[in-house]
Image (tube, grey):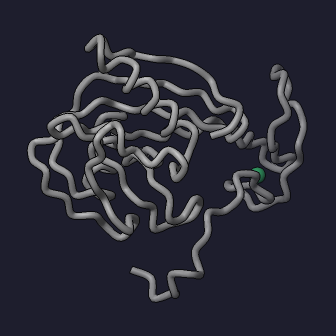
Amino acid sequence: MSSLPSDFFFPAPRAQRFCSQCGAPLHREIPPGDNRLRDLCRQCGAVHYQNPRMVVGTLPVWEGRILLCRRAIEPRYDTWTLPAGFMELDETTSQGALRETQEEAGARIELGPLYTVIDVPQVEQVHLYFLARALGPELDPGPESLAADWFAPEDIPWDELSFRTVQTTLEHYLKDLPRQAFGPHHYSLGAC
Ligand SMILES: [Zn+2]
């Protein structure tokens, strides 16, 4: 582990300035045979492709109540979210959703079917939420959460939700609830 202070770290911008292979400055141009601008190294020829990032999460339910976590991190510090986060390279979407739920809420859940698939091209992300059944009400929020709690549908803090993907996933769930027919729902948002 590094001994650097925690506030040293920040997510590096997606755009790279130097080649990851040889260190030469990158140039933004359309490679031969391609049709999009890429960060290209003229020295070694490496093309630095960028693709959307996956955010994976869950909508866990315990006795009709929905699990929300109060964010202890930016962006949207101190707002309520469904447990979710960036998928890691070595895991599947369902493993990532389970991991995030464990890390952010300490909830024991059984993963259900995929529920929402939300394209958010403006922020270069795709968000996936799985339905989940809690195996008990116990919660143990981790360092990324100020709190975690179960909310009855009528108590959801709509004005304090973190992201539009969370809001719309919850809206779909409450609409599906009376019919007991749950998605999946696929749609796009301008920004999350
Ligand atoms: Zn290079």
Could you say where residue 42 lies in the image, as x and y percent from the top left? 87, 46
- Give x and y (percent) for residue 136: 9, 47
For the view shown, which residue lies furthest in the front direction?
Answer: 154
- Which residue is painted at 66% across and 62% down in the image? 12
- The residue lying at 51 percent from left, 49 percent from top is 161
Q: Nearer the viewer, residue 46 or 184?
A: 184
Choose between 50 and 32: the one closer to the eye. Answer: 50
Q: How many marks?
A: 0
Considering the image in quadrants, where does the C terminus appear?
top right
Left or right of 190, for residue 8: left
Apparent side of residue 57 relative to residue 152 in the rendered image (left or right): right
x and y percentages locating residue 32 in the rendered image: 85, 25
Work out whether residue 87 or residue 47 is closer to the camera in this orientation and state it: 87
Q: Residue at x 84, y 21 (%)?
A: 35
Residue 30 occupies quadrant: top right
The quarter in which the N terminus is drawn is: bottom left
Is 151 placed above or below 7 here? above
Furthest residue in direction left, as rendered: 136
In the depicted view, which residue is nearer to us: 145 or 123?
Answer: 145
Q: Is residue 28 above or below residue 22?
A: above
Question: Would residue 60 appear left or right of 83 to someone viewing this image?
Answer: left
Residue at (33, 58) in percent of width and height: 104
| Residue 55 point in image, percent of width and height | 48, 41
The image quarter containing residue 57 is: top left
